[in-house]
Amino acid sequence: MATPRRMQISTLVNFVYDDEVLLPVRMSAARTVSGASGPATVGALVRLLICSAQMCVPARAQLSLSLPVKNQTPGTDPRVAQLFSAARAGLPKPAPAGWRFTWREDKSSFVLKAYAGRAISSAYFFPLDESVIDTGAKEAFAPSAAGFQLTLRKSDQLMKRVSRLRGVLVLADRQAYLVDVPAGGAGGNRAGS
């Protein structure tokens, strides 16, 4: 699964992934790295929450992997090729051609409107920017014949003016689309613009 789901425990809301998760990260080596210098070590500090139906517990791990350095065109490891292919296929995509998004700001909320050219039965917005949307508040979804409207309550931690509304929109069929709409974006701004 490449898209999260909303998990509420009491008044706390987390965005969680279930089962096996692959979050691809693009990496490249400096041009000065050579095989003569020995293996290269890739390291990462991973911070995550491990959740059950009753609670989420923070965890962290320091990971490292030692890789041989070779002067050759990178190849695909057949042992993991299918895993990466499936993960890429499930990543959020740009919205279909013809979809348009606009949003406006009210005193306590952002109202995101989508014109999709068809009825949408449900949608959930996962914000990419912290402290913009109150993730614990219920999103008010209103369908229309050609799309929908989502009312998103502002976070009480919002301290600056929002110039873009960015996030991932997940529909009922688990299709996920990237949304990146500038302020005052009325009149045909599309996801990714």
Image (cartoon, rainbow, N blue to C red):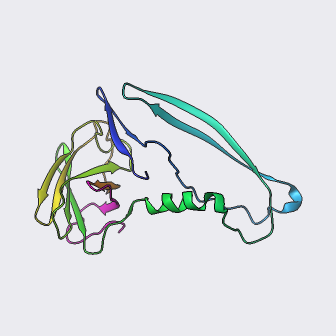
Along the line of sight, the residue nearer the viewer: 163 or 176: 176
- The residue positioned 86% from the left and 55% from the top of the image is 38
Is 88 left, or right, of 55 in this rendering? right
- The residue positioned 77% from the left and 71% from the top of the image is 72
Quarter of the image containing the C terminus? bottom left
Is 121 left, or right, of 83 in this rendering? left
Predominant SS of the magenta segment: loop
Q: Is residue 18 above or below residue 174?
A: above
Residue located farthest toward the right when viewing the structure as drawn = 36
Along the line of sight, the residue nearer the viewer: 66 or 52: 52
Q: Is residue 19 above or below residue 189?
A: above
Residue located farthest toward the bottom when viewing the structure as drawn = 97
Examine the image and state in which quarter residue 163 appears. bottom left
- The residue positioned 35% from the left and 44% from the top of the image is 5
Q: How many discs appear?
A: 0
Q: Is residue 165 magenta?
A: no
Q: Which residues are magenta?
A: 172-193
Q: Position of residue 80 (x, y in %)?
A: 62, 57
Q: Position of residue 33 (x, y in %)?
A: 80, 61
Residue located farthest toward the left when viewing the structure as drawn = 145
Is 193 left, or right, of 140 in this rendering? right
Q: Is residue 182 magenta?
A: yes
Q: Position of residue 14 (x, y in %)?
A: 37, 37
Examine the image and state in which quarter residue 184 appears. bottom left
Along the line of sight, the residue nearer the viewer: 81 or 25: 81
Is 86 left, or right, of 127 in this rendering? right
Q: Position of residue 149 (x, y in %)?
A: 16, 56
